[in-house]
Image (cartoon, grey):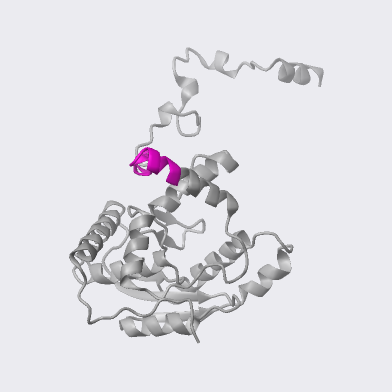
């Protein structure tokens, strides 16, 4: 029976010079991101989340290679979370991970049933599915003593998230390369933060990773994110390097040139006395107070 998954690569075939250059470029960018944000330290145990998509396969491949010559000693455990999506071929992924000769864990949690029960028919399930997945990843990492969680988000993901939050949330935020969870118990790292999606896709294709489609649940991907992705692709075609320039901007922030009073004390600029600062410039508010 024919399947849609890519076969395991032929290990006897020597990689071409083009593939070697691409791998070297990606490896250097991952190493630079790890160094810039101190993502991996001596004695860390990194849980590398492998979903079956191109990004996580490439991340695992590059981290495994970097570990051989890394300046610090750290452990890697590949982890796949099977959320019981219909037709998910966990056996294909497990066969691949087993062949790598590194520690791996296949975790099964039936979140699909929960999402189907909660989300109305026809609505996207991605948001709730993602939140449930994150909770499971956090708890599993804590149970197994893995202090770093590596996710496969890349530079394009980060820039797309920046515009999603601006356009639809009214906030200026993206995905940080390194994140401390709200409860302070987990450190999330994104080693592919400096890598472009097109390079990751090309590398995954030539390496013939056994890619698994992300639409097995039948849910449509985030339509707003797709629109942002098309916008950025069009910009890059017309103005090469624009996505890279936007990414650089989020690491060169000037709070005094924005408008967030929580980040910069605009009110104190030229302030002569505290009395004038306390006066209300809102007539409606003054009237309401005096009438009480």
Going 57% across and 71% down the picture, which residue do you hit?
Answer: 216
Q: Which stretch did the figure color magenta?
A: 233-250
Q: Seen from this angle, which residue lies furthest right?
A: 291
Residue 53 is situated, as x and y percent measured from the top left of the image, at 44, 68
93 on left or right of 25: right
Residue 247 appears in the rendering: yes
Determine if the magenta segment contains residue 245.
Answer: yes
**Observer-nearest residue: 210 or 195?**
210
Rendering quarter of residue 40: bottom left
Going 36% across and 56% down the picture, which residue do you hit?
Answer: 198
Q: Is residue 246 above or below residue 203?
A: above
Q: Which SS type dominates the magenta stretch?
A: helix
**Observer-nearest residue: 198 or 46?**
198
Q: Seen from this angle, which residue lies furthest front?
A: 2
Going 56% across and 67% down the picture, which residue do you hit?
Answer: 215
**Observer-nearest residue: 190 or 167?**
167
């Amino acid at each position: 029976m024919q399947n849609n998954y890519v076969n395991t690569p032929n290990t006897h075939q020597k990689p071409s010079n083009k593939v070697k250059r691409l791998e070297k470029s990606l490896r250097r960018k991952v190493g630079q991101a790890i160094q810039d944000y101190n993502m991996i330290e001596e004695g860390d145990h990194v849980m590398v989340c492998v979903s079956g998509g191109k990004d996580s396969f490439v991340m695992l491949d590059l981290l495994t290679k970097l570990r051989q010559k890394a300046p610090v000693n750290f452990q890697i455990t590949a982890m796949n979370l099977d959320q019981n999506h219909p037709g998910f071929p966990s056996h294909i992924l497990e066969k691949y991970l087993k062949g790598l000769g590194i520690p791996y864990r296949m975790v099964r949690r039936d979140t699909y049933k929960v999402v189907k029960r909660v989300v109305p028919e026809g609505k996207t399930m991605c948001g709730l599915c993602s939140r449930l997945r994150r909770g499971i990843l956090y708890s599993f990492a804590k149970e197994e003593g893995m202090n770093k969680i590596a996710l496969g988000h890349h530079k394009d993901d980060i820039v797309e998230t920046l515009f999603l939050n601006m356009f639809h949330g009214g906030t200026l935020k993206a995905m940080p390369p390194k994140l401390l969870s709200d409860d302070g118990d987990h450190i999330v790292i994104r080693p592919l933060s400096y890598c472009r999606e097109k390079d990751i896709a090309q590398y995954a294709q030539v390496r013939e990773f056994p890619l698994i489609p992300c639409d097995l649940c039948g849910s449509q991907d985030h339509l707003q994110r797709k629109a942002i992705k098309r916008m950025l692709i069009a910009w890059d075609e017309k103005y090469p390097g624009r996505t890279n320039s936007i990414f650089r901007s989020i690491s060169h922030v000037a709070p005094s040139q924005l408008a967030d009073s929580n980040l910069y004390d605009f009110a104190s600029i030229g302030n002569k006395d505290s009395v004038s600062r306390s006066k209300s410039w809102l007539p409606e508010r003054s009237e309401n107070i005096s009438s009480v």
